[in-house]
């Protein structure tokens, strides 16, 4: 029964290719296709807008920087191409019947901005990219924002509506009521399982190496799946195809170096980042300060090699390697050694079959490992959580005419997970959980009329552990009642075969587990409704409302003490949840004063039978209101100031309602104090914080430089992270554990040569 | 003009969701009234043990059993047959010198694999507390590999026991160590590192240590064969003579311990405190049972450098 649709898969693909061939026949119309690149670096531009002026024909470049129009009536047109930060490109072309016109476009960076041109480019980008539930992040913005020690992709994403931070110390993404477990993180089409450094303080992605960050907060299209919530799709730079180019950046926590350049048939890029805390640790050790790690460092390396074999064939090989290590003697006769990290490798081949059919083939390998070792009073405890994920994927994009854009593809992989605990040299659990998976999808974007766009698709998933076969419909519709107003509706079903046990306090112990026999995959439905407006003068106002369900959630039961010998399904507790909310984004891109105001109203709840007697409760990261304001001021040509203000409802926490004492237990020599409480029954005080920064940029001899001075929490707001209830004698003491309690300065210097 | 009006309507529509966006916070509930709390641990093969009855305390008040003790209740333990019927009743009486402490009227042995029900009546507003326990089967200590051990030396304590049993699941055990002659200068380094305050309090705090619950599968046996159990060094807090007990625990104590560990260790998120799993109808606390074997070992300090 399960295999039947699998057997049909080749048939479906065959039908698709037959359709492709049919559409590949010459006709009385013309077509135009090409790549859009940065003129100075040759970097392909994702999401650039290309249109034929005076017509309704327009599109945005895909993930490889490719665009195509078909079914164009012969004639003379002006091709316009725009992208943020680039001069708009205009070119007259004459197309004859049956012609397949190749138009590779190079956009010139507009460093000395003619404001109107740049603004129009930004507006164009916004118009095309703001599909429902999605957002795109400029990498330059990531570097400009006030940052905690290091510029960070995820912390920049946290400034968007619908995306929330768990705390000042966590870069984890909490999107539309889902935790980090529900967000798929892709780097160059490869899954990254633990995207954190410094135990969660910031993400692994080096902003110097990144070209594009795209976020789907919800109702992601059919090519994405595997998680109940959001998708973060990140692409590394290809490398400069014109000249060799480099940069170094020195910060308080870490230093970065990047070098990129051309080779005879393409380009390459290498970016390295490493923490530079050793001098500080040595100094603290010399002063005999207690509680200082013996050793702590992290590093990451990103590399990419591109081979532009021909106009229609491009290959690339990309890798990422990142590790965090800590050796910490936390008490007399007690120590912790922690090592965790990720490795990814992807080989990609982009092939343009014809002006109507574009294809991308990728082979990926991803590895996550977390191997903490504790030794307490001569008793060792070791954990090993490893994921090895090899996959092949392919995406086809067919544009038969200007009304349809068909996409289809598959992703097949061999997934292997190991979860092993040893206590006192004895194996408590050692689960090896291999699985094979196959995802496939087909989708059509249909634009029947000027103001309408409909997108429908289906995604199938097969997960061999437990033999789960699931189908998920996806649908969205967009209507433009007015020139500057767009109404959007999106729906999708999502499945998740993995679960993540993570703590916002310490991501080094992130533990992934899979669905399996008697552990069905989680699933949920998402519905979004959006209104996007362009108020003119570079101001946009977008609103989205969303509602989500989460069913069959499976999480490692935190109360399971003796895991040995238990069946796999006994390790979990099972529950459900829901989330709904509204998001408003007011964005001003024009002028010396620009920025954004993001507001989120959100509710999320969970229900597990063994928590609060089965009542719904808010997870800690549930925030009812969340307001974030970003303001940038271009003071002069060389000086730029940025500020970020956050204001949010307090998160949920548990305040015990009572306590009792077990004074006569034969198992202990002192009474045990027990809290009587329902889970997460109170709210912390509201949260607010202001961060500011100034950037001075210019040239210093042969190099361009950027000096950044930033202060986080300018006015010393003592936001509460959580309350700790501890017994002191006969009394219970409530201790406030603060978020960043004082102004935290940060200085960095970047050089580009 | 029409387009402008339409545009305003769109704007209003966009902002509509925010009208309902009032802050949905958990209401600041007042302090709930105190609950009745029972505490009692029955040991297989031993006399019926006392029942302690008190009320829970608010977070703000100091905890004092004598002030919170519940006096004048009617307490009894019932022996329940396989058909659920009460086979025997063992009434308790309140200890004259200590309110809230109830003792059995007659000495009765607690039988292994037997279900007992605690019933407390005569409380305010006609409330009744009920809790049941099934007593784990008794088991035997077959051998212990050493009577003297060097702390963190090559040889760890290894005991061999006949297996206990429990209806419907594997037997679950806990190690409990109790220093018999604890002295502050004989503390092992790990616990000494955390020791603050006066010596008597430190000794009292560390004299007895218990392990987490461990089920029989940890010792590689699913059948009825003997179990070889290795005692971790972590359970020893003092050099010198130590009683090491191995206790098979009932469901109530297992649920209480594993959930209390989660509450204490903060295995959930920061600021999130999971409630403990209890099986007391009409109140809170622990009514549990266990079976025990024990041995005594002498723990030597390792030779100095």
Image: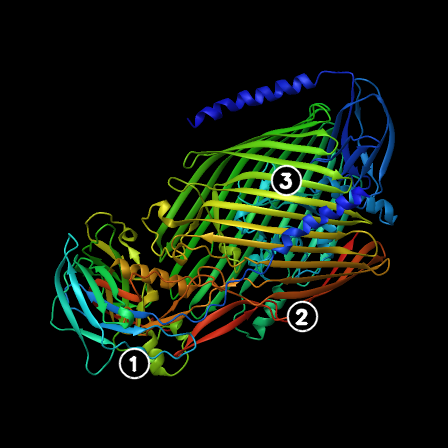
The first of marks 3 and 2 along the sequence is: 3
**Same subunit: marks 1 and 2:** no
- The answer, for residue A395, to whether it is visible in the render is yes
Q: Position of residue A730 (x, y in %)?
A: 38, 79
**Which secondary structure lies at badge 3?**
strand
Left or right side of A548 for B130: left
Q: Nearer the viewer, residue A678 or A151?
A: A678
Q: Position of residue A68 (x, y in %)?
A: 74, 29
Residue A501 higher or lower than B199, as above or below: above
* Residue ID for mark 2: A743
**Which secondary structure lies at badge 1?**
helix
**Same subunit: marks 3 and 2:** yes
* Residue ID for mark 1: B66
Left or right side of B23 for A128: right
Residue A699 higher or lower than A715, as above or below: above
Q: Nearer the viewer, mark 3 or mark 2?
A: 3
Q: Position of residue B28 (x, y in %)?
A: 49, 68
Q: Nearer the viewer, residue B285 or A557?
A: B285
Residue positioned 40% across, 82% down in the render: B197
* Residue ID for mark 3: A489
């Amino acid at each position: 029964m399960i295999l039947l649709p699998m057997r049909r898969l080749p048939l479906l693909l065959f039908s698709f290719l037959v359709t492709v061939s049919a559409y590949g026949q010459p006709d009385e119309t013309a077509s135009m296709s090409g790549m859009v690149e940065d003129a100075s670096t040759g970097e392909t531009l994702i999401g650039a807008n290309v249109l034929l002026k005076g017509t309704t024909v327009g599109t945005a470049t895909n993930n490889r920087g490719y665009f195509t129009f078909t079914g164009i009536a012969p004639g003379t047109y002006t091709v316009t191409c725009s992208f943020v930060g680039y001069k708009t490109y205009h070119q007259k072309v004459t197309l004859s019947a049956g012609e397949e016109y190749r138009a590779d476009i190079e956009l010139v960076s507009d460093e000395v901005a003619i404001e109107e041109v740049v603004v129009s480019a930004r507006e164009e980008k916004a118009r095309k990219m703001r599909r429902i539930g999605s957002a795109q992040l400029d990498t330059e913005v990531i570097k400009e924002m006030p940052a905690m020690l290091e510029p960070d992709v995820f912390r920049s994403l946290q400034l968007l509506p619908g995306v929330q931070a768990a705390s000042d110390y966590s870069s984890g993404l909490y999107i539309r009521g889902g935790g980090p477990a529900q967000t798929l993180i892709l780097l160059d089409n490869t899954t990254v399982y633990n995207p954190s450094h410094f135990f969660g303080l910031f993400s692994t992605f080096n902003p110097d190496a990144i070209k594009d960050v795209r976020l789907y907060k919800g109702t992601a299209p059919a090519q994405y799946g595997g998680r109940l919530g959001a998708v973060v799709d990140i692409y590394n730079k290809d490398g400069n195809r014109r000249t060799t180019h480099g940069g170094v950046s020195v910060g308080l926590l870490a230093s970065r170096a990047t070098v990129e350049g051309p080779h005879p048939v393409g380009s390459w890029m290498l970016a390295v980042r490493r923490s530079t805390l050793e001098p500080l640790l040595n100094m603290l050790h010399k002063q005999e300060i207690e509680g200082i790690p013996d050793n702590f460092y992290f590093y990451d390396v990103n590399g990419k090699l591109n081979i532009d074999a021909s106009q229609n064939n491009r290959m690339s090989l990309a890798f990422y390697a990142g590790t965090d290590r800590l050796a910490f003697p936390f008490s007399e006769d007690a120590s912790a050694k922690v090592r965790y990290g990720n490795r990814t490798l992807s080989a990609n081949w982009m092939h343009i079959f014809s002006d109507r059919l574009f294809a991308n083939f990728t082979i990926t390998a991803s590895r996550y490992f977390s191997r903490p070792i504790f030794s307490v009073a001569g008793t060792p405890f070791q954990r090993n959580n490893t994921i090895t994920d090899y996959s092949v994927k392919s995406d086809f994009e067919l544009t038969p005419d200007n009304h349809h854009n068909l996409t289809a593809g598959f992703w097949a992989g061999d997934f292997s997970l190991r979860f092993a605990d040893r206590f006192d040299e004895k194996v408590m659990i050692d689960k090896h959980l291999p699985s094979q998976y196959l995802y496939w999808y087909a989708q059509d974007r249909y634009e029947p009329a000027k103001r309408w766009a409909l997108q429908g698709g289906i995604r199938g998933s097969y997960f061999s552990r437990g033999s789960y076969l699931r189908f998920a419909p996806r649908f969205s519709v967009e209507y433009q009642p007015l020139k500057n107003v767009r109404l959007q509706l999106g729906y999708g079903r999502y499945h998740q075969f993995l679960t993540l046990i993570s703590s916002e306090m310490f991501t080094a112990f992130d533990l992934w587990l899979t669905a399996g026999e008697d552990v069905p995959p989680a699933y949920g439905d998402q519905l979004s409704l959006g209104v996007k407006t362009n108020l003119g003068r570079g101001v946009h106002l977008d609103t989205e409302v969303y509602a989500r369900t989460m069913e069959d959630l499976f999480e490692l039961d935190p109360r399971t003490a003796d895991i040995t010998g238990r069946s796999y399904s006994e390790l979990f507790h099972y529950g459900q949840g829901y989330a709904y909310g509204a998001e408003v984004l007011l964005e001003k891109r024009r002028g010396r004063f620009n920025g954004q105001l993001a507001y989120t109203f959100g509710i999320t709840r969970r229900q597990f039978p063994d928590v609060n007697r089965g009542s719904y409760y808010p997870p800690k990261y549930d925030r009812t209101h969340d307001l974030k304001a970003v303001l940038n001021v271009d003071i002069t040509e060389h000086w730029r100031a940025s500020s970020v203000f956050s204001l949010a409802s307090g998160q949920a926490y548990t305040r015990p309602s009572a306590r009792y004492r077990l004074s006569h237990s034969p198992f202990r020599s002192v009474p045990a104090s027990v809290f009587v409480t329902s889970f997460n029954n109170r709210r912390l005080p509201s949260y607010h914080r202001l961060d500011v920064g100034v950037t001075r940029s210019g040239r210093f001899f042969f190099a361009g430089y950027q000096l950044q001075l930033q202060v986080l929490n300018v006015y010393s707001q003592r936001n509460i992270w959580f309350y700790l209830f501890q017994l002191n004698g006969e009394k219970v003491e409530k201790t406030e554990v603060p978020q960043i309690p004082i102004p935290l300065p940060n200085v960095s210097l970047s050089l580009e040569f | 003009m029409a387009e402008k009006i339409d545009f305003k309507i769109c704007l209003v529509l966009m902002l509509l969701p925010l009208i309902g966006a009032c802050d949905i916070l958990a209401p600041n509930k007042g302090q709930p009234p105190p609950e009745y709390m029972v505490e009692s641990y029955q040991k297989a093969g031993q006399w019926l043990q006392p029942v302690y009855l008190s009320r829970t305390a608010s977070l703000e008040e100091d905890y004092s059993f004598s002030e919170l003790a519940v006096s004048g209740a009617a307490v009894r333990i019932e022996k329940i047959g396989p058909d659920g019927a009460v086979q025997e009743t063992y009434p308790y009486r309140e200890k004259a010198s200590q309110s809230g402490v109830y003792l059995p009227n007659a000495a009765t042995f607690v039988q292994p694999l037997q279900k007992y029900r605690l019933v407390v009546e005569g409380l305010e507003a006609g409330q009744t507390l009920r809790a049941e326990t099934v007593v784990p089967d008794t088991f035997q200590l077959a051998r212990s590999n050493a009577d003297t051990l060097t702390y963190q030396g090559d040889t760890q304590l290894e005991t061999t026991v006949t297996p206990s049993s429990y209806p419907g699941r594997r037997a679950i055990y806990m190690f409990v160590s109790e220093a018999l002659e604890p002295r502050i200068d004989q503390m092992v380094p790990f616990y000494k590192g955390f020791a603050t305050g006066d010596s008597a309090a430190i000794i009292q705090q560390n004299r007895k240590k218990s392990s987490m619950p461990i089920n029989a599968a940890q010792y590689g046996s699913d059948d009825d064969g003997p179990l070889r159990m290795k005692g971790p060094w972590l359970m020893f807090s003092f050099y010198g003579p130590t009683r090491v007990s191995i206790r098979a625990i009932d469901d109530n104590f297992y649920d209480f311990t594993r959930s209390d560990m989660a509450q204490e260790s903060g295995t959930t998120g920061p600021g999130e405190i999971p409630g403990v799993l209890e099986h007391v109808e009409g109140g809170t606390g622990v009514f549990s049972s266990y079976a025990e074997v024990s041995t005594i070992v002498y723990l030597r300090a390792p030779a100095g450098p």
